[in-house]
Amino acid sequence: MTKTPDTDRAVSFTGAVKAFGDVRAVDGIDLEIRRGETVALLGRNGAGKSTTLSLLLGLNEPDAGEVRLFGGTPARAVGAGMVGAMLQEGRAVPRVTVRELVGFVAGTYPAAMSVAEALELAGIAELADRRVDRLSGGQAQRVRFAVALAGNPALIVLDEPTAALDVEARHAFWASMRAYARRGHTVLFSTHYLEEADDNADRFVVIDRGRIVADGTGEQLRRAAGGSLVSVDLAGRGAEGLSLLPGVVSVEVRGDRARLRTDDSDATVIALAELGAIRNLEVAPASLDDAFLALTGPTDLTGPADLTDPAGPTGPDNSTLETA
């Protein structure tokens, strides 16, 4: 990855390690996030996402390596109101209104956003005089977003922000988040909803077993996992030799149907045609779910490897997808 100039860097992890007993929850992470990027942090449960976020926010100290925000320590950035966070843990404050809660939090920061602006940006201006402990789950989650915005942060960190929300509430939340991002602010969020990540992130960072296993755009992740899926009926032929066909990355057999993941679907289909094996042929692009499962499956994590995009650089920083 090309080194980002210090003035453009919002987040920097350098060899960060955090262990709990014998478990390395974060195992030598190197990561840079530029100012103005919206980045999705993806990973299975227990992959190290929450620990990574806790290091970023200064809630934990790394055992080795370094974490910097806007060129300084996390504690300094948080204290200066440069960072807002919306974490999974939280409970309603009784007997206070939304306006009172957001106003109280804003008053603890040196250059806070106005309460009216925070409520408007979070899409809850009409709830200003409602008691926080009498809101629906979706409304309460957007109040937490307004609280995270109260300090007028340059970076906001969202840990599973739409967990347990219904579809309508999720759409409303992401509309608010995009309005914040359009102001040129930096957003880092973790989620298990890959479709949400695809719709709202410029870049994806995939963590598995405490390490970054992929970093790039959604299209680059799909390409790294095998850009297309080719499916055919086996018609009693067996799947022997299919993994050797041009472009094929992996083969999965379900009943009498073979599913070939391929990075060159044209070459794969031509080869299948030459074998006379195109009964009920289907070709479809790999989904982000397919890419995620491929990238977080069993793999050798002994060292990083670059996956260069043969079509040339893509994405806002002209970087190629990096995997380990």
Image (cartoon, grey):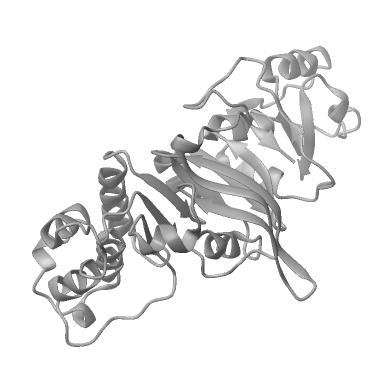
The residue lying at 78 percent from left, 31 percent from top is: 249
Residue 114 appears in the picture as rendered: yes
Relative to 94, does residue 56 appear above or below in the rendering? above
Q: Residue at x 87, y 31 (%)?
A: 237
Q: Position of residue 238 (x, y in %)?
A: 88, 34
The answer to whether residue 256 of the structure is visible from this angle is no
Quarter of the rendering occupied by the C terminus: top right
Image position, residue 300 (x, y; %): 84, 46
In front here: 232 or 214? 214
Q: Nearer the viewer, residue 270 or 180?
A: 180
Horizontal placement of 94 versus 196: left or right? left
Which residue, as the protein is rendered here, is positioned at the far right?
Answer: 240
Image mark count: 0
Left or right for 283, reference 28: left
Residue 7, above or below 302 = above
Image vertical order of residue 84 relative to residue 186, above or below: below
